[in-house]
Image: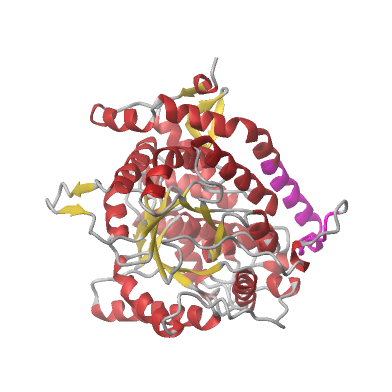
Amino acid sequence: MGLEEKITFRNAKIPKDSKGVFSKVFTPEALRFVAELAAPILGYHGWLLDERKERQKRNDADIRTLDFPEPWLDDEYSCRDDPSWKVAAHPPGLQQRHVEITGPVERKMIINGLNSGADCFMADFEDSLSPTWQNVVHGQKNLIDAVNGTIEYQDPKTGKKYALKDKTATLLVRPRGLHLPENHVLFKGRPIPAAFFDFGLYFFHNARKLVDKGSGPYFYLPKMESCLEAKLWNGMFAKAEDMLGISHGTIRATVLIETLPAVFQMEEILHELREYASGLNCGRWDYLFSYAKTLQNYPNRVLPDRSQVTMEQPNLQAYATLLIQTCHRRGAYAMGGMAAQIPVKDQVENEKAMEKVRADKEREVHLGHDGTWVAHPGLVPIAREIFERGMNGRSNQFEKTYEGTTITRENLLQVPTGTITEQGIYENVEVGIRYLAAWLSGNGCVAINGKMEDAATAEISRTQLWQWNHHDARTADGRSVREVYRGIIKDIEHQLPQDTTHRKATRLFLSMVENPQLGDFLTIPAYEQLFREEK
């Protein structure tokens, strides 16, 4: 029996109007490729997930375990002390990254993202996509069509047609994180890791075509926690290139530094991926979520309102500065974070939102970032004008190395200052439930109160509420968060639509907030519920 025959599908119904999509994505050759890619690294992948749990136990027991790594005991070499190595030279399409736009792998979004005028578009299987079976498989087909230049879309409501322009942004793809399974596809009787599934199918169908067009298979890697996880991706990249006969080092990857453990190993992560690395990115919302999750056991590490934890906070300034310092020392791009604001119809409110975007991008370019993220095409001109003016025509700011600046463990672990307010509690409850209801309905990228919310903001919302409840935090006026929160729940439940989806979202969200143990990810039980309902 070949490895591809050990791949089976579970509850993977194919609607009549989608059979052509599924047959295009799941060719025998594609399944064989994914199987051969996954087989040798499944054991290492499982060990890495176990190591995450063990690392959290060590963090819970002693905060001093969170620190920069020492040289390995059996090898005194430290990549930190070696000034000679750099990441690989940057390929066409990734030599200027002033503005990047992101969005889910939906057909209309892919077209708009590629046409947006940004330097790069990141098509997302992760935080901005609800991973229904339809969304995931159609996302792969949409990317095949995008790479072939044949992608088109006609809005069924307006009749408006969408197609690619002659000049488009460079395409990058973000597979799902290592912690997530793809429940519809079993390999050797167990759900295949979603990261292997997303990466493998996209690479098989598109890598050679991209190379022939003068580009390449470029990726963003999410939720990484250690250089050992970078080592897994390095091995998978090399094997994938060998299997398709593509030159070694063709793949490029930008790593999102969006976990607290990873910020201490940025140098090691780049070193593991040095033949493939393009840069590192400040994933600020997931980083806040990880800060609260990693330090969940410490009542003196409780965060204030999410709106108060801006990038001007000392710990986040240290995080961004260290990322820039690390990247520029090694010739890698240091990408800024997401501007969550989106254009709104009210002129006064819209100008306020745009001012926040401008201030954020001015801060990033002044600090030394080489590019930034936006969530809406309307923000591309604003971000581009700021970065092009701030960088004086240069494609990067590699000369800004922060030599002589030392970022310490204490800088990174410093607690953000601020207060907990009733408004902050309300916003966390509202955003968490409204976003989760949309996610369970198949929409993972949701505009709420003038911001584009995704799974990262839902995660920080529920984790903050858990942290405040668990440690019996107090509001600025001295009230128990737990008591304020219970009153808000009753108020919001009356305001939300009284439908089945919102009731399920409310139950799931509150169960995670009120559980004595902090769950690792909201998306894991949410995906299980999504999968059960798809059956």
Q: Quadrant of residue 503?
A: top left
Q: Is residue 409 magenta?
A: no
Q: Is residue 70 magenta?
A: yes
Quadrant of the image for the C terminus? Answer: top left
| Residues in magenta, as a range | 48-72
Q: Is residue 347 visible?
A: yes
Instruction: Decide: is 497 above or below 361.
Output: above
Spot occupied by residue 278 in the image (x, y as percentages of width and height): 54, 61
Report whether residue 437 is seen. Answer: no
Looking at the picture, how far across and down is residue 139, in whole percent? Answer: 36, 43
Q: How many marks?
A: 0
Task: Tell me which secondary structure the magenta stretch mostly adopts.
Answer: helix
Of residues 504 and 394, the one nearer the viewer is: 394
- 518 on left or right of 62: left
Residue 5 % position (x, y): 50, 19
- Left or right for 381, reference 314: left
How does the figure colour the protein chain or chains? secondary structure
Q: Position of residue 465 (x, y in %)?
A: 56, 60
Q: Quarter of the image holding residue 23?
A: top left
At horizontal 56% and vertical 76% (from top left) the residue drawn is: 398
Depth check: give the residue in front, 120 or 47. 120
Would residue 455 be found to the left or right of residue 324 on screen? left
Question: Residue drawn 54% across and 76% down?
Answer: 311
Residue at the extreme left = 159
Q: 533 or 68: nearer the eye?
A: 68
Quadrant into which the N terminus falls? top right
Front residue of 504/397: it is 397
